[in-house]
Amino acid sequence: MPTATGIAPPMQNKTEIDIVKSFGDWTTFCHSYGLKPHDNDDNIEAIRLLHRMADEEILARKLAQTLSQQQAGRR
């Protein structure tokens, strides 16, 4: 993973890609959280943060879908 230049690490899924894109790019994502993408420890922390954000987004979508299906079943 080339962190010295702030190049984004490989994303695990589309949700992670979308999150980073919503910030503009990897460098902006890192800077938004006070992290330096060229610092290996900060880059690792940014990756962990991204994974948590993506996990929460995926769970929120699943919950919304489940609730929608339950409501449709009551009609």
Image: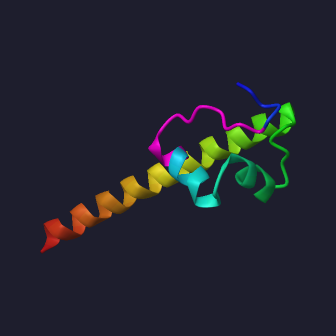
- All told, the count of numbered labels is 0
Picture residue at 85% right of the left edge, 54% below the top: 34
Let me know if residue 40 is in the magenta part.
no
Q: Residue at x 71, y 37 (%)?
A: 7
Q: Which residue, as the protein is rendered here, is positioned at the far left?
A: 75
**Split into 4 quadrants, where in the image is the N terminus?**
top right
Residue 11 inside the magenta-drawn segment: yes
Vertical position of residue 5 compared to residue 28: above or below: above
At x 84%, y 31%, the residue is 40
Residue 55 is situated, as x and y percent measured from the top left of the image, at: 53, 45
Q: Is residue 72 above or below residue 57?
A: below
Give the residues in magenta.
6-16
Left or right, 66 with respect to 30, comes to: left
In the rendering, at what x and y percent does residue 27 appear? 74, 48
Main SS, magenta residues = loop
Farthest residue in the top direction?
A: 1
State whether residue 35 is above or below residue 43: below
Residue lying farthest to the bottom in this orientation: 75
Res 32 → quadrant? bottom right
Q: Residue at x 50, y 54 (%)?
A: 57
- Quadrant that contains the C terminus: bottom left
Q: Is residue 70 above or below residue 20?
A: below
Picture quarter containing residue 9? top right
